[in-house]
Image (spheres, rainbow, N blue to C red):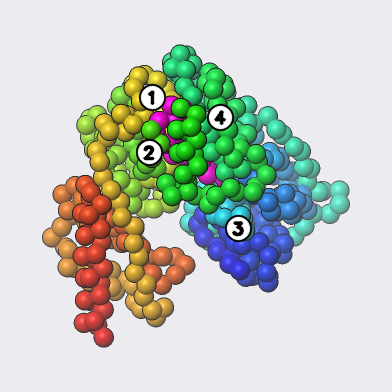
Amino acid sequence: MTLIKSISGIRGTIGGAVGEGLTPQDIVKFTSAFGVWASGKSANKKIIVGRDARISGAMVNHLVTGTLQAQGIDVVDLGLSTTPTVEIAVVAEQAAGGIIITASHNPRQWNALKLLNADGEFISDVDGKDVLVIAEGGEIKYAEVNELGKVTTDDTYLQKHIDQILALPLVDKQAIAQANFKVVVDAVNSTGGLYVPALLRALGVQVIHELYCEPDGKFAHNPEPLPEHLSALSNEVLNKKANLGIAVDPDVDRLCFVCEDGSMFGEEYTLVAVADYILKNKKGNTVSNLSSTRALRDVTEKAGGEYFASAVGEVNVVTKMKEVNAVIGGEGNGGIIYPELHYGRDALVGIALFLTHLAKYGKPVSMLRSTYPGYYISKNKITLTPEMDIDALMARVEKKYEKQPHTTIDGLKIEFDKEWVHLRRSNTEPIIRIYSEGNSETVANNMANKIIADIKDILQVSE
């Protein structure tokens, strides 16, 4: 059993002992703490709740909505929804915050409470710590019977979300309809099975083949949309002679594509392609996190804009985007943040912008992919003993490469011309994650192996 309390919310496996998994007591405890925190931030005692389709979702939803109601907080329950849809609803309803019941790309035994502020954005690290303090020792009072909150259901936000996307100037419904795309959708049996086909129909796509689109939470494969999990989608694209395949994660904030020839477009290049389209129409800056591909920087600079890197984590990307007034941003895991709609990763707006780009490009997806720089990211890790001083170790590595361009805003990222290595300590394990990018798999792996060898040498000297 696992229970993780972090900036991204309260995440854990269902069942087990209290405090060791996401049990009913833990759900009530952290929901209550968030209710106290949100009520202290806003006079409008209303919270939006939505969930993905995972098996435990209904159970967790009952506990969350009942707890908030017991605190005298009104709840607008969107039911089966998506993370970006809840974010939009928080703002539209002028709510004090939101709770999204989803463990994102984690397997079916997991669930989580993702916490939003009144702007419909993930709460900050500081606010998250405040919620945890309340949960562990703050005074929590519940409402008397005449002051209980009201729970209302609202299933209109699917259409409201789609309508807002269609209203965006850079979404060209006519161009998409005229392209006569044939699309296969893999929604891993979660809420993308409701939202993605509905969006495609609204965009004028006539031929939609649905793969794993029944929102019953019985994930047909590992729900993280990585190439090794999308073989069925790839095969279906070929079998149906489709123009492309679309894959989303269970809460529809990550997006990736499969080309018409069955090859992977690459989740790192989802943001690159969408940014390319945006920058062709609006000059400006872009942001991604330090572990994302350099290709976004290349595309941005080619278009006359400036690229900025943030610490890893959606809230950090959003903060940097606001700081530099970025026109597009996101993360290399297939997360698109388009501020003209809202400051949150949104696969649905990503789909609409990408299809517009593809329709105007007028050639197959694989050819579009070939127009972008070819980089490869290698992901590795090195395990250390729990008592190891990781900060001191990272400082030694930084000293060794002090003459190279580098940054320490999130771990240590070292640049070698157009190649880089990024070292980050895990928040939950005694490990250092090592990401490296080069113009080939061999180059990326060699860089990672060199850094790993350096770390081992430093550890031997320290012994």
Q: Residue at x 47, y 22 (%)?
A: 181
Q: Earlier in the sequence, mark 3 or mark 4?
A: 3
Q: CA distance from mark 1 to mark 3?
A: 36 Å
The image's mark for residue 209 is 4
Mark 2 burial class by Cα count in 10 Å: few <14, some 14-19, many 20+: some
Residue hosting label 1:
358
Residue hosting label 2:
263
**Amino acid identity at mark 4:** His
The answer, for residue 394, to whether it is visible in the render is yes
Are dots 1 and 4 in contact, CB under 8 Å? no
> Residue 28, percent across and down?
71, 59
Q: Which residues are magenta?
A: 242-260
Q: Count every numbered label the image shows and give the total.
A: 4
> Residue 107, percent across and down?
57, 55
Viewer-closest of 219 and 293: 219
> Residue 387, percent across and down?
39, 80
Q: Residue at x 41, y 72 (%)?
A: 430
Q: From the viewer's perspective, is 100 left or right of 371?
A: right
Q: From the viewer's perspective, is 161 left or right of 359?
A: right
Determine the secondary structure under disc 2.
loop
**Amino acid identity at mark 1:** Leu
In which quadrant is the C terminus drawn? bottom left
Residue hosting label 3:
110
Q: Earlier in the sequence, mark 1 or mark 2?
A: 2
Kindly indicate the quadrant of the structure image that contains residue 284. top left
Kindly indicate the quadrant of the structure image that contains residue 362. top left
Determine the secondary structure under disc 4.
strand
Q: CA distance from mark 3 to mark 2?
A: 30 Å
Q: Earlier in the sequence, mark 1 or mark 3?
A: 3
Q: Nearer the viewer, mark 3 or mark 4?
A: 4
